[in-house]
Amino acid sequence: MAPPSDLRKQTQVLQRLVKEVAFHRKDLKTQEERVAKLKANPDDENAEFMLKQQRQAIEETKRVIPAVQEKVTQAIEDLESLLENNKGEDASVEVTDAEQAIKDAKEAVGGA
């Protein structure tokens, strides 16, 4: 079996980064829901400690998201450059996948 092409590798990198952004956004939402739940039930003896821990986790997640989005933006640029360099080749499945990955990534980075 032939090794994957550079185009295929870069497409997979971009797809992985898009999944990572989605994961962190989902995680942030879950953490915010936990904070709201803890605020609603302040009677729990560990509520104050847990609230502090959740707020810290939220701040860490908020710091990670922009960094991953920057990586996505760079991966988009790299993949677009690679597509431009391979423009003379036929429209293979790899090219179609790469174009779709770019489209999906731009939507993921643009939508918060």
Image (spheres, helix red, strand yellow):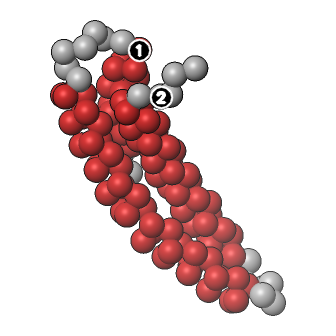
Can residue 29 be seen in the rendering of this structure? no
Q: Hey, which residue is sitting farthest right in the picture?
A: 45
- Quadrant of the image for the N terminus? top right
Dot 2 surroundings within 10 Å: few (below 14), some, or many (20 or more)?
A: few
Badge 2 or badge 1: first in the primary sequence:
2
Q: Is residue 55 above or below residue 29?
A: below
Between residues 84 and 62, which one lies in front from this camera angle?
Answer: 84
Using the image as rendered, state which of residue 107 and residue 84 is in the foreground: 84
Q: Amino acid at mark 2?
A: Pro
State the residue at coordinates (33%, 33%). 102
Residue at 64 percent across and 82 percent down: it is 53
Identity of the amino acid at label 1? Answer: Val
Does residue 27 appear left or right of residue 47 in this picture? left
Q: Nearer the viewer, residue 40 or 88?
A: 88
Residue at 36 percent of width and 18 percent of height:
96
Residue 58, relative to residue 79: is it above or below?
A: below
